[in-house]
Amino acid sequence: MKFEALKQQIQNYTGPNAQELRAIIETVSLGGQIQAAYMQHLNEASNWRDFLERIYQDDDARMQIAWTKIALLLHPGIFLERFTPSSSFEALTPNGMLAFSPKNGQADVTVAVNAPSVTVSIYMDGEINETVFDNAEYASCDSSCAGVCIPGPFSIHVLGRNVAVVPWVYAEDGFRVSQFVRRCLA
């Protein structure tokens, strides 16, 4: 498929999420051309939906902003299956709240959930695309949740009855650097 044909298909689309589709095309293009990272997906695609699905199925693209937009558009609620947590556990959520209790005596960090129980999955920094979540809470030190100790600091993301916890990794200069970025720079 040619990039001009893809752009034309998207421009002609008037169905639901037309604006989101146009935003995805802007994300995968640069200077009016498709970015090199998405050229193979475009060459193998037969239409705009096939193009987006090819990006979504590409494991190497999972950490990209374009992948995030495609996942939220085409596969909301199920895209977490594309990431493998280091560990996970079930937790009860009385009153719709899940608490993370810091080991240093600070106040609990709580997140609202809309389920009587949730699956809490722990992903090492860089093992999940955190941009797929609308918001995050943060715990600044080691904490426990449902009796499980989680090394801090970490971010907490809620999506339905799934809670993703991402302990942070720090560079020598004290700034958070994901393991994914470290692998890319190595």
Image (spheres, rainbow, N blue to C red):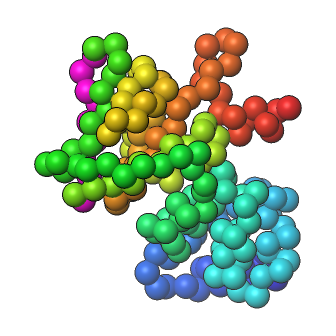
Q: Is residue 13 above or below residue 59?
A: below
Quarter-wise, where is residue 30 in the image? bottom right
At a point 32% along the width and 39% down the height, the residue shown is 146
Residue 134, position as x, y percentages in the image: 41, 50
At a point 46% along the width and 41% down the height, the residue shown is 165
**In the visual, does 87 lie left or right of 103?**
right
Predominant SS of the magenta segment: loop
Residue 180, position as x, y percentages in the image: 71, 39
> Among all residues in the image, which is located at the extreme front?
147
Which residues lie in the magenta part?
Answer: 106-115
> Among all residues in the image, which is located at the extreme left?
95
Quarter-wise, where is residue 33 in the image? bottom right
Of residue 73 and residue 153, the one placed in the foreground of this image is 153
Q: Quadrant of the C terminus?
A: top right
Of residue 92 and residue 59, the one placed in the foreground of this image is 92
For the question of whether residue 130 can be seen, the reply is no
At a point 51% along the width and 43% down the height, the residue shown is 122
